[in-house]
Amino acid sequence: MGTVAGGQPAKLDIEELLATRLLVQGNSGSGKSHLLRRLLEQSAPWVQQVIIDPEGDFVTLSDKYGHLVVDGERSDAELIGIANRIRQHRVSCVLTLEGLDIEQQMRAAGVFLNGLFDAERDFWYPVLVVVDEAQMFAPSVGGDVSEDARKLSLGAMTNLMCRGRKRGLAGVIATQRLAKLAKNVAAEASNFLMGRTFLDIDMARAADLLGMDRRQAEMFRDLKRGNFVALGPALSRRPLPIVIGEVETSARSSSPKLMPLPNAPQDVEDLIFTPDPEEFNRPLVRRAPPAPRPTTDILAELARATPVANDDPAQSPRPSQAEISPEEREERMAAVLNEILDDPQAAYRTDAVLYQEFLVRARMRRVGGPPMAMGEFRRRVAVARADIDEETAASDSWQSALSLSMRVSDDLQGVFLLMAKAAIRNEPCPSDLRIARAYGTHSARRARRLLGYFEEQGMVVVHTDFSGKRIVAFPDLEAETQPGDPNAADLPESRTAAE
């Protein structure tokens, strides 16, 4: 594999590796791919090899060592058939997944590995199965891929590392992040080559696998590119630093190098903005599908829908479906809104959830016409939560408070109107928990931040009396609340408190 300190050769026992498996770990740029290439080149004459290559870096092995390159963009049946014939005829191959998205890569790798695993007993010859970027195919947690793809890939990797030995499959997996690799897959390896690692969680897992304490794990940060710590029956009985040797083939992609920029031509604008005639003949790039429509838009569209005209008198609209007057429509909408807000849990639900329930109940009540807009719904909810009586609602001060509330966002209007009502009616200042409930949260700290925000906007002035009780003044309304205890307990409902 290379050399150890003192220049002695670092050797790896291939027969022992076939029975014990290997795990390679190192951050990007530590030399993992170089190590795998060295291992593949040195063992190519002695053992059949199968490489799962997500980036297409190992296809160059075919030029010198005759590896068959298999494109992963095939059907499941094709991949299974190729895997069976690979084992039957003992041909080394590279499954290149370049050009596929992550979910397609996981599916193709899972199907191919299962095909190798399910080969007939007569073809259970020893095979070195190398999987680069193993954390993609055996993730420790679910990601953005479908659950079916994750289970297929993770199950295939588990079979390879846990049950593959009896079928002649020796797994060699390489990963950038041990913490992102499924533990049941990593734990089956008995040989380890640990490269440069910076994150504490990865160093801790590497130290546990190597039987080292946490202080010794700090050495992984200081390893140079191409330097690894080896441990295992096929490598060394004690942790052994080694330097990976040179390789005879090279990857199609390499680490980026600095290079000077070319001299800018004088006609650079014409060069960039003038299209190439061949560009118009290239196929259009397939764009991503449109985002799904929000549920609120679908419900609003359903509410606007009118029934299809029917000429059959026996199926004429019922009286409940007939058009209603604006006054009756307003009365029904107010009744629906009150039903929703009477639920004790409504104070802690988002406006979007309440709005969906409002639209559904409005349809059930046969409220025709265009649905209420989201902005108007939020404003009505804010006014309803303020619990204003008819006398206060008709006052000029309340109308001024409604105008002032337009200066804040929709989600803050309920809190602002609650405080304004207490000032107009000369009531004690609401407690932190009462303000939090008006905002739809249980956090008293967030309630205090809201008051601080209103004060920063110049809309209120917050101060305390000699006993420490809070007073909120509204300069534009020329009103202020009575002193109130900010730490007082919140009543279940403002309406119940008023009673």
Image (spheres, rainbow, N blue to C red):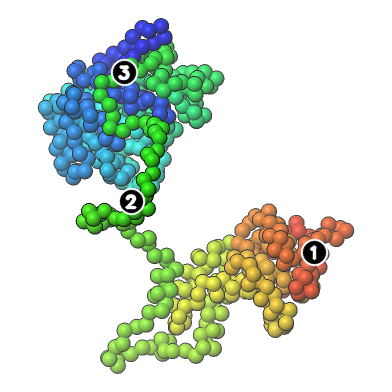
> Which is more toward the observer, 158 or 85?
85
Helix, strand or loop at label 2? It is helix
Task: Name the residue carrying label 2.
Answer: 271
Residue 258 horizontal/vertical position (percent):
41, 32
Task: Name the residue carrying label 1.
Answer: 471
Helix, strand or loop at label 1? It is strand
Task: Name the residue carrying label 3.
Answer: 246
Residue type beneath disc 2? Leu
Does the image show residue 124? no
Q: Give residue 53's mark.
A: none
Residue 318 horizontal/vertical position (percent):
38, 88
Residue 481 horizontal/vertical position (percent):
79, 69
Spatial CA distance of label 3 from label 1 is 77 Å
Query: Which of labels 2 and 3 is toward the front?
Result: 2
Asked which quadrant contains residue 292, the reply is bottom left
Q: Could you tell which of marks 3 and 1 lies nearer the N-terminus?
A: 3
